[in-house]
Image (cartoon, helix red, strand yellow):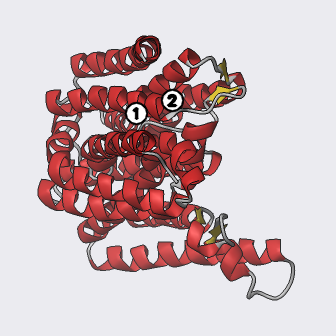
Amino acid sequence: MVDAATLATLVIACLASLFMAWAIGAGSSGSTPFAPAVGANAVSVMRAGFFVGLLGFAGAVLQGANVSEAVGRELIAGDVTLSATAATLALIIAATLVAIGVFTGYPIATAFTVTGAVVGVGLAMGGDPAWAKYVEITTLWVLTPFVGGGIAYGTAKLLRNESISERYAVSTLAGLVGLILANIEFVVLGPSGEGATLAATLGEYVPGPALAGSILVSFVLALLAAGLLFREMEESAERGERRFLLVMGGLVAFSAGGSQVGLAIGPLLPLLEPQGISITAILVGGGVGLLIGSWTGAPRMIKAIAQDYSSLGPRRSIAALIPSFAIAQTAVLFGIPVSFNEIIVSSIIGSGYAAGDGGVSRSKMAYTVFAWVASLVGAIVIGFGAFSVVDLLL
């Protein structure tokens, strides 16, 4: 039986988590996936906000467990487990910083603020730094601008190459996306508590070794995706490009939900699971928060990213979304909290430079990078200081 004081603390922690989920939905996961599509005039701002909310919710429920576990249990080493007070402070600090970014139009990296806040309060509780996890996280954060921007640049150059048929180039990219999609894990396909890929699941029905079946299914799905888009582009290249762009926006929105929900609910896992609340129920709650945030606050940030950073066309938008999808799924697979703002902005810049300066605002980017670094350092310092003060007073 939970006493009244503990119950009140849990309620406050859950409200802080819901606020964090709203801020994420209104900011990174709600704004970035469809920003290139909006910039290419493939979908309106309001419609993008509507669909990204639904897809983000689906991604949160189906793929959110890995990052949630990492944020809730792997950022602090030793015997320290986040208390209700620590979790509440971390979520409020992170959500406030993200909300500031939402209302000022500057996309603050959500993963930086949440990771920093959790590390700050965890160290203040007497925990040890989880250096191995920090190296893993930092490696992805540092590589993301170079890998994402580089792939986007190369893809945009490919699509601009007049010696290569646009129909073949875009269809090949669709096949690559299909190959990736066949090999990402979905919790509904695996045994209880685990995920499984489409390739592995369908490969079980193919005679012979399991690995051979998975490979065969992967290539069949890749060829199917490429063939469908090739046929579409035979009828109308412009319509085919825009449909592919919308599909990519949907896949990135789904991936955003899978990675970003953990930033909101991760700190709650050590508090709610001992009370008998399943991680699936917690993921649904976080997904609802993302959904509300996307529907109420995302349009402002969608406009900021789509119009302020670069004037995008369909091909450059496709070039930006492909690496975004791949990097997001890599983060989900390894349970690494990652900022979608960092992913998408880097990809947009990479695709933009394939066409010259791409209309990228250098001053805007300088302020954004400063906001990313300041939010990480600030969240660690504020989290450590806030918990130390509260612990002293209580």
Distance from Cα at disc 1 to Cα at disc 2? 34 Å
Question: Helix, strand, or loop for circle 2?
Answer: helix
The C terminus is located in which quarter?
top left
Q: Is residue 389 visible?
A: yes
Q: Is residue 347 left or right of residue 366?
A: right
Residue at 36% across / 48% down in the picture?
160
Residue 60's spot in the image, x, y percent? Answer: 44, 58
Q: Is residue 124 above or below residue 36?
A: above
Q: Which mark is residue 125?
A: none
Q: Splitting the image into 4 quarters, where does residue 20 fall? A: top left
Residue 38's spot in the image, x, y percent? Answer: 19, 52
Q: Splitting the image into 4 quarters, where does residue 242 fall? A: bottom left
Q: Which residue is mark 2?
A: 146
146 or 386, which is in the foreground? 386
Residue at 51% across / 63% down in the picture?
280
Question: Helix, strand, or loop for circle 1?
Answer: helix
129 or 30, which is in the foreground? 129
Q: Is residue 382 left or right of residue 220?
A: left
Q: Which residue is mark 1?
A: 88
Q: Is residue 164 above or below residue 188?
A: above
Q: Splitting the image into 4 quarters, where does residue 192 fall? A: bottom right
Q: Is residue 359 visible?
A: no
Circle 1 crowding by C-alpha within 10 Å: few under 14, some 14–19, many from 20 = many
Q: Is residue 348 above or below residue 285?
A: above
Residue 176's spot in the image, x, y percent? Answer: 54, 61
Q: Amino acid at mark 2?
A: Phe
